[in-house]
Amino acid sequence: MIGPPTTVTVTSTVTAIVTPTCEPPTPLECDKYGYLIQYNSLYRVDLQTGGYEQVASAVSDGNNVNAIGYHPLDNYLYGIVNPTRQLIRISSRGEATVVSNFTVAEMGATANVGDVDGEGYFWFGGAGRTWHQVDLRRPGSATYGTIVARGTADTLGLSVADWVHIPAAGPYLWGVAAGVVGGGTGTTLMRFSLATKRWEAVARYRVLARGGYGALYGINNGTLYASNNAVGQIWAFNVFGGAPRLGSDWHEPVRFDVEFPGREWKSGYAFLRIELTAEEAIVVVNAKEPRSSPIVLDLILQFWVCSSNALRGAAPSIWRNEPTTLPLVKLFETSVAKSA
């Protein structure tokens, strides 16, 4: 007997393996900025103006990241976390990835100088008196992330707070120290040879600013930028020769409102040049809108003075084109005329 058709429901279970994807850390771009870590915060620094902005407030789980350097082969920053002695890779957003963990026996308690050479070796140490060479050439290789050589060096009686590699200047790590070999006052440009592992003094200059020098930045045209810890200036040194110059003394003319003593001057172009010393800043400003004609362009330049601390305090507002008040005292005024 054939009955009515029967409906059978078949349930099929399909199991799919899904691998979650995460956005990889982004490397740095080739730009005009230097990068600085203070304690655990990453900053982007404009070496021409001295202006800066915070990129990340918590780079690592440690309380201090130091000895950072830029890796030219992968465009990441690398540094040492103190006091955990971790070697980390840092992305453009301040994200950190642990590469290696070192022991006290391997590297000592802490490190404060570091950079990567053109071959991909990370060189770090303590105050230039110890050096460690880490292989960061090829991820996945047997020696990647390990210390392949280490030793000590004589800093010639000077204090080294950072070093930087400049490929165009040969196999050296460069430093700037307050003081001179043998004692006395001045400023010394020095270099550590990656071949001989010895320091040598390259040039001696006058005292450029009180205090020592911290973070260093290198440009492959032979320029070394050194940040002064006491007064916040950035000095530029040509490692091939020549006198150092104040690297952060120029600023492109910016439009902003500023209140001067006894009058209010609005919407003018100012900060044509700032001469910054340890104690005061000479500010040259265009005191009024240019009066132009087909023949002559007239400018009245006023020279004012204010304390360096006041100028540095107002700098973030100035760079953002916000209304700014500077405690200025007028020095003198001059008229300039030039052909249009």
Image (cartoon, rainbow, N blue to C red):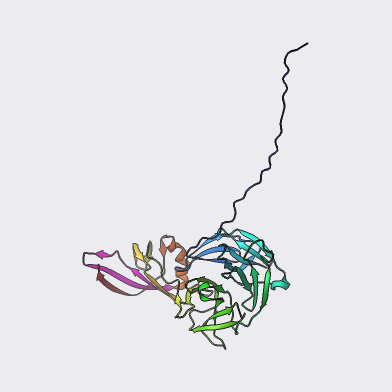
Q: Is 72 on the left-hand or right-hand side of 338?
A: right
Residue 266 makes an appearance in the image: no
Q: Which residue reaches farthest right?
A: 1
Task: Judge whether residue 290 is colored magenta.
Answer: yes
Residue 13 in percent (x, y) is at 71, 33
In terms of depth relative to the viewer, which is nearer, 14 or 192? 14
- Which of the 4 image quarters holds residue 144? bottom right
326 relative to 130, above or below: above
The C terminus: image quadrant:
bottom left
Q: Which residues are magenta?
A: 283-306
- Please, is residue 25 above or below residue 105 in the view? above
Residue furthest to the bottom in view is 182
On the image, which quarter does residue 76 sit in?
bottom right
Query: What count of labels does the image hold?
Result: 0
Tell me the quarter of the image containing the N terminus: top right
Residue situated in front as seen by the camera: 275 or 324: 275
Q: Is residue 289 magenta?
A: yes
**Residue 211 x, y percent position in the rendering:** 54, 78
What's the residue at 45%, 71% (across, down)?
Answer: 248
- Seen in the image, is 244 located left or right of residue 142? left
Occupied quadrant, residue 293: bottom left
Q: Main secondary structure of the magenta part?
A: strand
- Name the foreground residue: 150 vs 48: 150
Write the residue at 61% across / 69% down: 121
Residue 95 image point, x, y percent:
60, 58
